[in-house]
Image (cartoon, rainbow, N blue to C red):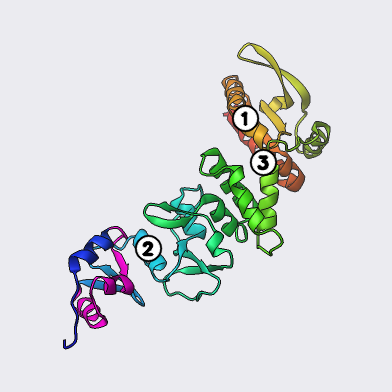
């Protein structure tokens, strides 16, 4: 083709190898290819057009990472964000999704290959490289997701990040300093979840929690039960909040807030396992479960009881 300027194919191959087989027109031009030369390679099958001005070498496998890389390269400035970032960070509960990227608020939010989030704080958003892709940090990722996740899913993701060391509570401080006074969807719910996980967060009053648990147990379908039932844990005397003898079932109400629950998690497991060795099953209900979903607590209790009754008859 007249006027065609052929560039350095080895340079494109080397560049694409670092970007999951993807490159954009600007990078091709920097390697010496003009528009006609790019078009020829697309027609002869050497390159594959993924979206306007973004290409892949034909040998690159069409993996999810290739699509995410293409989405990032489709904009002059972009970073992986949202659910895509959560998956890259290995946050529990997130899998392959349509690529999600974040761009400055002045950018075009329409894309044929990705969901695009525009942020007026783009230049202040913390990023890091994950699997070779520029990605919002775990803390920034969770803020982005806070607007769309249900509260329980949001808190589970936060717990997973902290317990696995992907993020620290302090990582959220500069984020909330940045958005102070600004309208940020989901920030309030995330803020409350973070507050509940601070070292100084309060414990729920045990008497109040006990009343809520007893309210669930007061249903006529629940057999006779005993409070503060004495037990032996590996030879050490102890007690369970409630014991239902006919079901050999212990019911515990967890008044401890997040930090205490995580700190005592191992001792709880040791205790539960010791009771299981005695044929006693343990059910644990948290403050939020008893306060917000008492009917679900009762349904779970009755279902477990029915199952244990059936086992005892078999």
Q: Residue at x 54, y 44 (%)?
A: 167
Residue 54 visible to the viewer = no
Q: Position of residue 299 (x, y in %)?
A: 69, 43
* Towards the viewer: 252 or 42: 42
Residue highlighted by disc 1: 263
Query: Of marks 1 and 3, which one's residue comes earlier in the chain?
Result: 3
Q: Residue at x 36, y 54 (%)?
A: 132
Within 10 Å of the Cα at label 3, are there few (<14), some (14-19), or many (20+) other Cα atoms? many
Q: Which of the 4 image quarters holds residue 148?
A: bottom right
Start and end of the magenta stretch? 18-45
Q: Which mark is residue 248?
A: none
Taking the image as shown, residue 189 lies to the left or right of residue 61, namely right
Q: Residue at x 42, y 53 (%)?
A: 129
Within 10 Å of the Cα at label 2, are there few (<14), some (14-19), or many (20+) other Cα atoms? many
Q: Which mark is residue 69?
A: 2
Q: Is residue 78 magenta?
A: no
Q: Which mark is residue 197?
A: 3
Q: Position of residue 187 (x, y in %)?
A: 66, 57
In the picture shown, does residue 221 fall above or below 269? below
Quadrant (top left, top right, bottom left, bottom right) of the N terminus: bottom left
């Amino acid at each position: 083709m007249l006027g065609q300027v052929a560039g350095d194919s080895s340079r494109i191959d080397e560049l694409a190898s670092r970007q999951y087989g993807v490159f954009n027109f600007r990078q091709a031009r920097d390697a010496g290819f003009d528009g006609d030369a790019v078009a020829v390679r697309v027609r002869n099958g050497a390159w594959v057009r993924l979206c306007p001005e973004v290409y892949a070498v034909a040998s690159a496998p069409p993996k999810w990472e290739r699509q995410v890389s293409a989405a990032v390269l489709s904009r002059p400035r972009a970073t992986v964000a949202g659910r895509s970032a959560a998956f890259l960070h290995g946050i529990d509960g997130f899998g392959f999704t349509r690529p999600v990227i974040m761009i400055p608020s002045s950018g075009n939010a329409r894309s044929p290959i990705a969901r695009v989030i525009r942020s007026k704080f783009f230049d202040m958003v913390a990023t890091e490289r994950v699997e070779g892709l520029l990605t919002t940090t775990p803390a920034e990722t969770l803020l982005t997701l806070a607007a769309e996740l249900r509260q329980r899913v949001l808190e589970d993701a936060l717990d997973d990040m902290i317990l696995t060391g992907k993020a620290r509570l302090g990582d959220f401080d500069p984020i909330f300093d940045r958005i102070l006074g600004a309208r940020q969807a989901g920030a309030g719910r995330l803020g409350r979840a973070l507050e509940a996980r601070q070292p100084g967060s309060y414990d729920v009053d045990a008497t109040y929690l006990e009343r809520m648990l007893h309210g669930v147990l007061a249903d006529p379908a629940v057999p006779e039960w005993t409070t503060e039932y004495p037990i032996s844990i590996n030879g050490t005397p102890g007690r369970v909040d409630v014991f239902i003898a006919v079901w050999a079932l212990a019911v515990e109400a967890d008044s401890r807030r997040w930090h205490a629950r995580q700190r005592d998690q191992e001792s709880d497991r040791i205790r539960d396992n010791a009771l299981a060795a005695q044929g006693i099953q343990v059910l644990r209900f948290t403050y939020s479960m008893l306060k917000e979903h008492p009917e679900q607590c009762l349904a779970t209790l009755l279902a477990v009881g029915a199952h244990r009754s059936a086992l005892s008859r078999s």
